[in-house]
Image: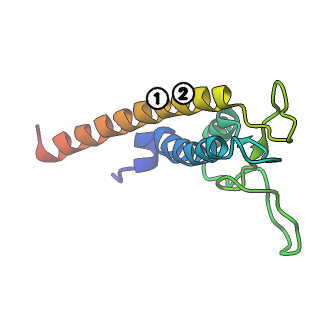
Amino acid sequence: MQFNFEKYLGLHESALGLQSRRAQLLAANMANSDTPKFKARDINFREIIQDIAENPGHKGPLEETSKLHIQPPQFSNGYEILYRHPFQASIDGNTVEPETETSNFMDNSMRYMASLRFLTGKFQTLQSAIKGQ
């Protein structure tokens, strides 16, 4: 019988990678909160995870059939990076709202830690099984 890591780890492996990459996007937003005309970006995390759950092995919603296609900014596995619509745009055209970004960053960090703890538990269980405990 062959052991399947993807099935054993579930979506948490994918979630960890997505949350890590999302943290980079949110940090970039916060770092550019004073940059004129900077547009805050994010992803629809739920939509991506749902797509991964429903279509394992699928590379994302965008498929390139020609090298001449112009691709939008890519997040991971072909998923598009979205621009955030601010509640109130600033005069200089910057769409970063520091409170929103901080809140999203903290939420993403907590979810990252939860996924990391879940995966740590899974690997500890595997280690115990290997040792015969």
Residue shown at the point (83%, 62%) measured from the top left: 71
**Would you name the residue on which mark 1 appears?**
110
Q: Are marks 1 and 2 in contact (CB under 8 Å)?
A: yes
Estimate the x, y position of residue 42 in percent, counting from the top left: 70, 41
Left or right side of 14 for 98? right
Residue shown at the point (23%, 39%) measured from the top left: 124
Mark 1–mark 2 Cα distance, whole angstroms, equals: 5 Å
Count of marks placed on residues: 2
Q: Residue furthest bottom?
A: 67
Estimate the x, y position of residue 53 in percent, counting from the top left: 61, 38
Residue shown at the point (77%, 50%) measured from the top left: 61
What amino acid is found at the position of numbered circle 2 in the picture? Asp
Quadrant (top left/top right/bottom left/bottom right) for the C terminus: top left
Estimate the x, y position of residue 33 in percent, counting from the top left: 69, 41
Q: Secondary structure at mark 2?
A: helix
The label number, if any, that marks residue 2 in the structure image: none
Q: How is the image coloured?
A: rainbow
Q: Secondary structure at mark 1?
A: helix
Foreground residue among 2 and 48? 48
Foreground residue among 104 and 43? 104
The label number, if any, that marks residue 107 in the structure image: 2
Rendered view: 78 above or below 46? below
Q: Say few, some or many: other residues with alpha carbon within 10 Å of mark 1 (under 14 / 14 to 19 / 20 or more).
A: few
Left or right side of 92 for 16? left
Foreground residue among 107 and 35? 35
Left or right side of 130 for 117? right
What amino acid is found at the position of numbered circle 1 in the picture? Met
Q: Say few, some or many: other residues with alpha carbon within 10 Å of mark 2 (under 14 / 14 to 19 / 20 or more).
A: few
Estimate the x, y position of residue 36 in percent, counting from the top left: 80, 47
